[in-house]
Amino acid sequence: MSKHAVRGLPRKGRERAVAKARDARDTWALGRALIGLAAVLGDEEDPSAAASAYEEAIALQRSGNDALGVATTLLNLGELAVHDRDASRAKVLA
């Protein structure tokens, strides 16, 4: 079982959280929801979709001047690149 599913929300729940935040136009909540979805996608071995979700979250965090959020999400994106053995993505993040 995925460590993220244990936290309570499997993929469908994470996708609903993203949709709800989009509908509410709550960029902070959307960023957080995207991070949760990206973590689940990474666990499900869908690194491309996970990276896209992390990158969207980073863009939202940057627009909201959330430096800590950006740093944390970049760390997650870097861990994904290492796990996926994606040297080109890891090099861009370095």
Image (spheres, rainbow, N blue to C red):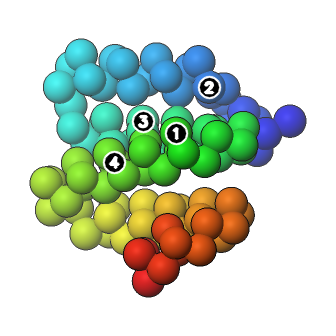
Residue 34, percent from left and from top: 42, 39
Decide if residue 72 is on the left or right side of residue 13. Answer: left
The residue labelled by disc 3 is 33
User: How far is mark 1 from mark 3, CA to CA?
Assistant: 14 Å
- Location of mark 4 (residue): 57
Question: On residue 49, which mark appears?
Answer: 1
Mark 2 or mark 1, which is nearer the start of the sequence?
Answer: 2
Residue at 60%, 60% in the rendered image: 80
Question: Residue extending furthest right?
Answer: 1
Q: CA distance from mark 2 to mark 3?
A: 11 Å
Asked where in the image residue 93 lies, by quadrant, the reply is bottom left
Q: Nearer the viewer, mark 1 or mark 3?
A: 1
Front-most of 49 and 37?
Answer: 49
Q: Which badge, 3 or 4, comes first in the chain's sequence?
A: 3
In this rendering, the label closer to the viewer, 1 or 2: 1
Instruction: Tell me which label, 4 or 1, sits earlier in the chain.
Output: 1
In three-dimensional space, the C-alpha distance between marks 3 and 4, rounded to whole angstroms, equals: 8 Å
What amino acid is found at the position of numbered circle 1 in the picture? Ala
Quadrant housing residue 3: top right
In percent of width and height, residue 69 lies at: 34, 61
Q: Which sits earlier in the primary sequence, circle 1 or circle 3?
A: 3
Q: Secondary structure at mark 1?
A: helix
Instruction: Name the residue type under label 4.
Output: Ala
At mark 4, the secondary structure is helix
Q: Nearer the viewer, mark 3 or mark 4?
A: 4
For label 2, the SS is helix
Kindly identify which residue carries mark 2.
11
Pointer 2 or 3: first along the chain: 2
Q: Quadrant of residue 86?
A: bottom right
Query: Dot 4, how many residues are within 10 Å of its Cα: few (below 14), some (14-19), or many (20+)?
Result: many
Q: Residue at x 31, y 35 (%)?
A: 30
Q: Is the Cβ of the residue at disc 4 closer than 8 Å to that at disc 1?
A: no
